[in-house]
Image (tube, helix red, strand yellow):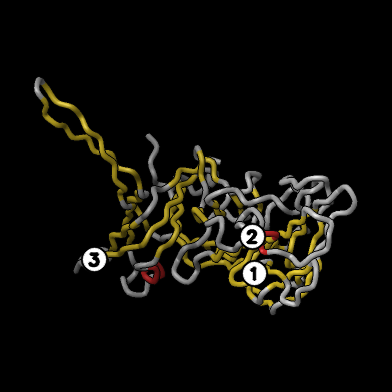
């Protein structure tokens, strides 16, 4: 019978800092991945997510000067390449109209990657279109820029821009930092025991308004956990779903009812003195644990995370030990690839 004699348990003892870096679109424009197996969520080391987009202000309005075909942009701030960037107001930005029979044109008002207000002109057409890059449709904007509004003309005659010409619906004409909302920060991802990478899921797909039909950029700053062996550990159990069956009497018999709950993980550790042991520094902190059934076969393991509870025991004539609990919010994951 196999035993756990050659097992090993690791805990998150430290973190490696990864500065603000671009996440990768998984292809659905909703799920964005990092290059990390998992992200730390210990207090002070939680990930920071910064999607490109407007934070405050940057409202597009008809030019106060009254000049034809021009718009003003108010002061404001935005996330740009993972950095909060403040902009002053910009006035009299020129928008183009169509010509001859192609009377319709859409202009995208953007903030470039350099933090400058720039008008990107669409292709004129006989009618307005919602198709990016099409005649009469909104243009694709450069990768790294942020779209803040569209100015739509259906006449070739120069005139003062009307408020009705300006559209700024979030995730349609205007890229916002907080919309679509982040639905979930995935500190790790596992499906059918296969480990992928940590990342974020948005509540809905981001609009594809950039060159090559791509969405805005999403950045994250995070810490990858550094693992250290829990010396002299035993009796490890990961956080797991516990199922309970009860019965309800009915006329002529009974019916069964099944409920589930999340059971905390636990393990026991033999300590050196119960005071200066390294793992005691992690008491009360939310950290990762990694368990290998065989320390020489690292392709299969269990990942579990939770707040570490420690109850030390100081007997007079036997080993100093601690009963440890992993107070989790999600069950542990078995990883086989």
Answer yes or no: is residue 187 visible.
no
Q: Horizontally, is 176 left or right of 2 in the view?
A: right
Label 3: element kind: strand
Quadrant that contains the N terminus: top left
Q: Point out the tag, 1 or 2, that comes first from the N-terminus.
A: 1
Residue 287 horizontal side relative to residue 269, left or right: right
Mark 2 or 3: the one toward you: 2
* Disc marking residue 284: none
Determine whether the residue tagged by mark 2 lies in a helix, strand or loop. Answer: loop
Mark nearer the viewer, 1 or 3: 1
Q: Which residue position holds label 2?
A: 168
Disc 2: CA contacts within 10 A as few (<14), some (14-19) or many (>=20): some
Residue at image position (31%, 48%) is 262
Could you give the CA–CA distance between mark 2 and mark 3, rounded to whole angstroms?
63 Å
- Label number found at residue 313: 3
**122 above or below 126?**
below
Q: Is residue 256 visible?
A: yes
Q: Closer to the camera, 315 or 63?
A: 63
For residue 306, above or below residue 6: below
**Disc 1 and disc 3: Cα gap in Å?**
63 Å
Residue farthest along the right direction in this orientation: 100
Return the disc, 1 or 3, that comes first in the chain's sequence: 1
Foreground pick, 236 / 203 = 203
Q: Pick out the residue farthest to the top.
A: 252
Residue 42, x across and y down, in percent: 45, 66
* Residue 169 x %, y %: 61, 57
Label located before the other in sequence (2 or 3): 2
Q: Which mark is residue 59?
A: 1
Left-right relation of 55 to 146 = left
Circles 1 and 2 in contact, beta carbons < 8 Å: yes
Rendering coords of residue 309 (x, y %): 31, 63
């Amino acid at each position: 019978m196999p035993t756990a004699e050659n097992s090993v348990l690791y805990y998150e003892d430290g973190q490696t800092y990864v500065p603000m870096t671009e996440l990768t679109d998984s292809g659905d424009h909703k799920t964005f991945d990092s290059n990390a197996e998992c992200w730390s969520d210990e207090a002070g080391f939680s990930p920071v997510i910064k999607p490109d987009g407007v934070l405050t202000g940057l409202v597009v309005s008809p030019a106060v000067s009254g000049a034809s075909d021009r718009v003003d942009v108010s002061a404001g701030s935005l996330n740009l390449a993972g950095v909060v960037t403040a902009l002053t107001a910009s006035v009299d930005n020129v928008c183009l109209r169509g010509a001859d029979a192609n009377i319709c044109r859409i202009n995208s008002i953007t903030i470039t990657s350099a933090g400058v207000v720039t008008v990107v002109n669409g292709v004129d057409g006989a009618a307005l279109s919602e198709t990016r890059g099409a005649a009469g449709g909104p243009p694709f904007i450069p990768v790294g820029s942020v779209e803040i509004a569209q100015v739509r003309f259906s006449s070739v005659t120069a005139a003062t821009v009307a408020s009705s010409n300006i559209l700024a619906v979030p995730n349609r004409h205007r890229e916002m930092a907080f919309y679509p909302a982040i639905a979930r920060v995935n500190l790790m991802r596992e499906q059918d025991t296969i480990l992928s990478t940590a990342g974020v899921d948005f509540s809905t797909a981001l609009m594809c308004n950039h060159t090559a039909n791509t969405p805005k950029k999403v950045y994250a700053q995070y810490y990858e956990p550094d693992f250290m062996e829990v010396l002299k550990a035993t009796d490890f159990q990961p956080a797991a779903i516990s199922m309970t069956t009860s019965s309800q009497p009915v006329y002529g018999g009974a019916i069964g009812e099944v409920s589930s709950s999340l059971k905390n993980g636990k393990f026991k550790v033999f300590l050196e003195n119960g005071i200066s042991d390294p793992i005691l520094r992690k008491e009360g902190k939310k950290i990762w644990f990694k368990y290998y059934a065989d320390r020489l076969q690292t392709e299969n393991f269990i990942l579990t995370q939770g707040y570490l509870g420690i109850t030390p025991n100081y007997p007079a004539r036997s080993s100093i030990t601690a009963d440890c609990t992993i107070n989790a919010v999600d069950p542990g994951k078995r990883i086989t690839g």
